Image (cartoon, coloured by chain):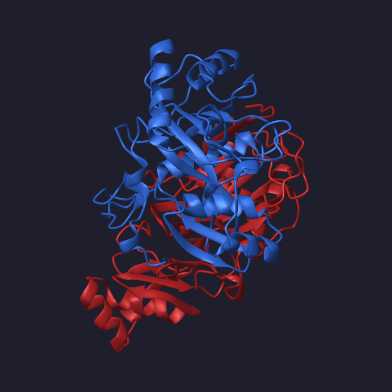
Chain colours: A blue, B red
Amino acid sequence: MPTEGGRVEILALSGLPEVRAGDDLGAMIGDALDATPGALPLEPGDVVVVTQKIVSKAEGAVADLRTVEPRPEAVAWAQRWDRDARAIEVVLREARRIVRMERGVLITETPQGYVCANGGVDASNVGPASGDLVTLLPRDPDASAARIREAIRTRFGAEVAVVVSDSFGRPWRWGIVDVALGVAGLLPLEDLRGVPDADGRVMKTTVRAVADEIASAAELALGKTTGRPVALVRGANPPPGEGVIADSLIPAENDLFR
Amino acid sequence: MPTEGGRVEILALSGLPEVRAGDDLGAMIGDALDATPGALPLEPGDVVVVTQKIVSKAEGAVADLRTVEPRPEAVAWAQRWDRDARAIEVVLREARRIVRMERGVLITETPQGYVCANGGVDASNVGPASGDLVTLLPRDPDASAARIREAIRTRFGAEVAVVVSDSFGRPWRWGIVDVALGVAGLLPLEDLRGVPDADGRVMKTTVRAVADEIASAAELALGKTTGRPVALVRGANPPPGEGVIADSLIPAENDLFR
């Protein structure tokens, strides 16, 4: 699977088993790379994209709703909008700030600084017979990505980048797209300011959110229903470096859509 | 370049010349498909992604700033934020609604219903010696996509989908990502509500913005500086159908971030 300029390939990795709390995700992803035709040898510029759900599960970032006592505000909201009051309680506990809580939509700012629906708390694909379990976001997705990166480096002797991804909605457009929650070994933004465009004109404002685009591209190969939670993206060649996802997040004081 | 499930390939098309007003973009893209190793034969599920700039240029959706007389509000804003008052005037003329005009950021709702910075008016990559030209958004990007789709169907006898893409910023996250401006031959949203997840649990709220993810994925192969404005995305297999981009846009009355 060699790549030249202008060609990107995305492989959903094969054979990843159900992930449980305490599992060694780096080793499991290494096994999946071994099991996926065309994935090896790893190449410079490769990015391994790991969806949030399995990172949260491996790290035990899961809440059991049977242990959650919802506050009256959560109960009222849940009744009005046909939601689970205990899950709303979890979202409110995790929230650093409530951005919107109206018309059945609850958007919060998480401790990591993301602004997203339901604070990233999610009940889908948690595992078999998991009716009362929800996943929380990983505490430090950059660190999660760095651990996976280090495991791959140790096992294969290759410098890849890693993106931990999740599906977020956006204002103004329906539907969710995958974005980066955490990164290791790349800069999440590619800053083209000062670089000439194809006509030789210096571009003034172009900063590409390349980690987010890589997360979205990976989602095309992974889908939502197939139980494939890790992809290899080859040929995108994001800017290498020791970036952190906070570089991508607009601080509340600079945000026009608080 | 065959694809099985879980594999997506993106090829930047080769050999597309500079596009000028009145050019037959469908024919030019057909030539580029012919010139790109691995692109042919076209396969079911293929998507041709065409960036807005060349669509606007071919359709003559360009404004010559030398003919634009800015209103006092545009002059004042431009002076304060070091912008071209004539370009601001063009944005204001095109706008159906001003969403934000503060701290140097001008976000409008365009006649097509997009909410984006500067109404999609853009001075980069317009063409050689184009100091006073800016591109406007295509009037009807779905129709632009449909014309290209029809040209490919006629020439190659293949049913592909077409996405016209552009780079938009988002609230809460720095940087731009490519999204769909117009579509033909696909549904921009993949509605998984009611579909079981990998654990057999029925998903309640998952609607994937697949056309936007395809646009972002294409951008990874195209980049911003290389003069490659068209990509072929193979293996994403978006839901086929006669969708329109309006299906993707949240009407202002349902929008929590007006």
Q: Nearer the viewer, residue A106 or B14?
A: A106
Q: How many marks?
A: 0
Q: Nearer the viewer, residue A70 or A171?
A: A70
In the image, is A21 to the left or to the right of B241?
left
Q: Position of residue A113 (x, y in %)?
A: 39, 50
Residue at 36% of width from left, 48% of height from top? Answer: A248
Residue at 43% of width from left, 12% of height from top? Answer: A156
Residue at 53% of width from left, 27% of height from top? Answer: A58
Q: State the image quarter where residue A38 is shown.
A: top right
Return the residue found at the far bottom. Answer: B72
Residue at 32% of width from left, 87% of height from top? Answer: B71
Q: Position of residue A198 (x, y in %)?
A: 34, 49
Judge whether residue A189 can be spotted in this image: no
Judge whether residue A45 can be spotted in this image: yes
Q: Position of residue B238 (x, y in %)?
A: 68, 45
Task: Give the position of the C terminus of chain A as an image quadrant.
Answer: bottom left
Q: Nearer the viewer, residue A150 or B133?
A: A150
In the image, is A141 to the left or to the right of A61?
left
Q: Position of residue A18 (x, y in %)?
A: 64, 24
Taking A153 as reference, is A124 above or below it?
below
